[in-house]
Image: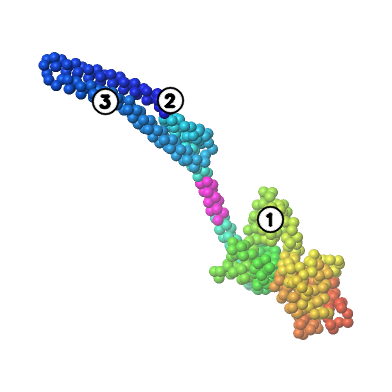
Amino acid sequence: MSARVAAASGKIIGHQSVASSRLISRHARATSQRLFAVGSGETGTASTLERDSASIAVKADMLPVRATGKTIGSIAHRRRKHSKAKKLLQRDIKRAKRLSDPALEGVLDVSRAAAERKSLLRVKPYRSTRKDLRDAIRQSKRASRQYRLAHSRVFGRATKAGLRAKRTYRDLKDTSRAVRATAAAFNAARSAIVHLVTFVASAVISMVTTMLAPVLVLVVVLALVVSLFTIVSNFFGSNTDTVGNIPAEYLDDVLRAGSICPTVTPQVIAAQLEAESGFNPHVTSASGAQGIAQFMPGTWASHGKDGDGDGKADVLNPHDAIYSQGSYMCDLAGLIEQDLRSGKVQGDQLALTLAAYNAGIGNVEQAHGVPANGETRQYVERITDRMSYFTGSDGVIQVGEVSGKLGNCAERQAFCYGHATGNTVGGTGYPARNCTLWAYQRRVQLGLPVGSYMGNGADWANSARRLGYTVNRTPAPGAIMVFQRGQAGADPLYGHVAIVERVNADGSVYVSEGGTGFATFPFYETVRNASQFEFIHN
């Protein structure tokens, strides 16, 4: 038994001793009363006195035992209270740990120390510690609620602002689409208006020829026609009379796509189509680009439009693809204009728009201009150089001759100048001394793309279109000249190909060629009427 327990026990036993003396005093008085009764002649007094004395002795002997029992019971009761308080404190500590709040760490340390101390029979420290811990938990939860509330308010405001911006962008996009559609419709009506005015003017002229002032009327009507045509042309964009060298089946689509915005003219659309697919609507590149405008699937999913009104936007439908190309280019031109105003990019708006079409608007903004990669720069230069070809003339003859290496395509390079070359590893499929073998070898020498399995000579133009080469009827130094079967003395079964070494000012071309029928390999000659042949470029 510890000192504290012994002291408590002694204190209780002392109190019991006082009670014992009182009890003995009461018994003594009872005994004296009985003695008095004996003196008065009452019987049985001696036996009663003896019995009372024995009872007093037994009770006096039991007093220490009872005191000890009460002391032990008190200690056990205090132990139970102590254990319960300690368990409650440990439970609160576990709950506080789950909050993971740094502000609770100090209170938790104090609480752990209090729980580890062995303060026997003392409950008050545990209760005080529990109270402090509960207060800290309440404060932590209150702070957490306030943080969540503030965060939800900020997040809610940001979400609402984002939704408002999205709705505004959608409204602007719808408005822009409506304006473009209206402009395209008016642009299509422009030609009809001019023809109508011309017809009316002709009728008026025929009516007034019998009158006295035919010359004056003619001048007035012509001035009216010219003024109306000028106003309409200035308001609605490019002049359709300056567009040419476009396949007839795509002319209306090119004019429509080139009238959506001022930056993207029909000449731009035509030069892009030539560079992308050679006006072939069935081309699929090695990277997955599809159709006459070479849309990637992801871009088509967000920018593909129904151009012919059949209710379906089909990337392989040239009418849909060309109209979608013009719309997408105008969207990019608008974004580039904003970037130019903000100083995010620098350069020519059309060149930057073409670069964004080829490499993506994000890469243009990251490079602050046309990206430095060779493919994009060549793409931009190629289209801007070819725009003059689609201005209604018969084409620009590129007078000159082969000098040095014209390109940077390695032998059997699978991808060059923005399209698949048609090369495969493991040599070529062209027989010795044939025209196709010489065309392949000479193009490799010039660093220009050429396929190692493009078929017979007459098949090269179609193979080139399928792979993404530019194919037209304009000669240029280094281009592949394609002879159809039997054309200009070519083989009636296989056709023929040659390489343009020089373009003369009179339109004739000086070519190098192979073939078993020639005296030398290669053989050189001048071919006239070059516009009657097809030429494969980069």
Judged left or right of residue 286, residue 20 is: left
Circle 3/circle 2 CB separation < 8 Å:
no
Would you identify the image quadrant in which residue 191 lies?
A: bottom right
**Quarter of the picture holding the C terminus:** bottom right
The mark closer to the camera, 2 or 1, is 2
Dot 3 or dot 2, earlier in sequence = 2
Residue most toward the bottom? Answer: 492
Q: Secondary structure at mark 3?
A: helix
Query: Is-magenta flag for residue 162?
Result: yes
Question: What residue is shown with label 2?
Answer: 3
Q: Residues within 10 Å of mark 2 (few under 14, many from 20)?
A: few
- Residue 95 place in picture, x, y as percent: 46, 41
At 59% across and 61% down in the image, what residue appears? 302
Are the residues at dot 2 and dot 1 in contact (C-beta closer than 8 Å)? no
Which residue has dot 3 on it? Answer: 58
Q: Main secondary structure of the magenta part?
A: helix
Query: Callout 2, which amino acid?
Result: Ala
Is residue 120 or residue 370 the one in the foreground? 120
The residue stretch that appears in magenta: 155-170
Q: CA distance from mark 2 to mark 1?
A: 86 Å
Judging depth in this view, the residue of 26 and 49 nearest the camera is: 49
First in sequence: mark 2 vs mark 1: 2
Tell me if residue 88 comes above or below residue 432 in the rendering: above
Q: Hey, what amino acid is under mark 1?
A: Asn
From the image, tell me which residue sits under label 1. 363
Q: Nearer the viewer, mark 1 or mark 3?
A: 3
For the residue marked with disc 3, what is the amino acid? Val
Count neighbours of disc 1 (C-alpha within 10 A) and say few if under 14, some if 14 to 19, many if 20 or more. some
